[in-house]
């Protein structure tokens, strides 16, 4: 690990401090996470997204309308609230990471499905209205 000293605007420093306190991590780790490029998508993720092109319009509509199961969303919210009060255990942190990864994958699938529906000129108005 290499050490680098940087100057941050006061507002950015305050944001980093707030996030560090909220997640009970050192500010250096928070800032490091900000500048670290995202990990490339795994081959499995790329294959799953590529496979969407072969789906029917109806199947793509189901994916575009899909949501995180309520019990998973509730559990992730509970873990995030717990993290505000104390450091998560290794098991809790692993569970939270797994839930976030599932949410990220669902978001990628939905985005790709919406893209394909738009290409097919089959994007329903209620979904099109949500796109900024």
Image: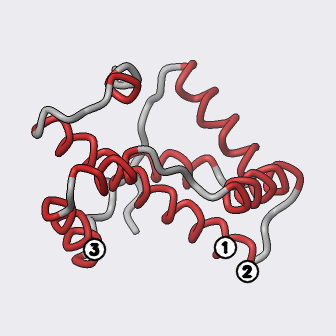
Q: Are marks 1 and 2 in contact (CB under 8 Å)?
A: yes
Residue 2 falls in image quadrant: bottom left
Q: How is the image coloured?
A: secondary structure
Residue 104 drawn at (x, y percent): 44, 56
The label shown at residue 28 is none
Q: Closer to the N terminus: mark 3 or mark 2?
A: 3
The residue shown at (79%, 75%) is 89
The residue shown at (32%, 63%) is 39
The residue beneath circle 1 is: 95
Q: Residues within 10 Å of mark 2 (few under 14, many from 20)?
A: few
The residue beneath circle 2 is: 91
Can you say whether 131 is above or below 76 in the image? Answer: above
Q: Residues within 10 Å of mark 1 (few under 14, many from 20)?
A: some
Callout 1 secondary element: helix
Residue 113 drawn at (x, y percent): 27, 49
Residue 26 drawn at (x, y percent): 65, 53
Can you say whether 106 is above or below 110 in the image? Answer: below
């Amino acid at each position: 690990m290499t050490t680098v000293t940087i100057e941050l605007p006061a507002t950015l420093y305050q944001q980093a401090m707030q996030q560090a306190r909220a997640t009970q991590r050192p500010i250096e780790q928070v800032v490091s996470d900000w500048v670290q490029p995202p990990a490339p998508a795994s081959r499995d993720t790329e294959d799953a997204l590529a496979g969407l092109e072969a789906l029917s319009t109806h199947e793509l509509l189901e994916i575009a309308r899909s949501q995180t199961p309520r019990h998973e969303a509730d559990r992730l919210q509970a873990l995030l609230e717990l993290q505000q009060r104390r450091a998560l255990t290794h098991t809790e942190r692993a569970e939270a990471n797994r839930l976030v990864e599932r949410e990220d994958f669902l978001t990628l699938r939905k985005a790709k499905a919406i893209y394909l529906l738009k290409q097919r000129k089959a994007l329903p108005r209620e979904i099109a209205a949500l796109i900024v």
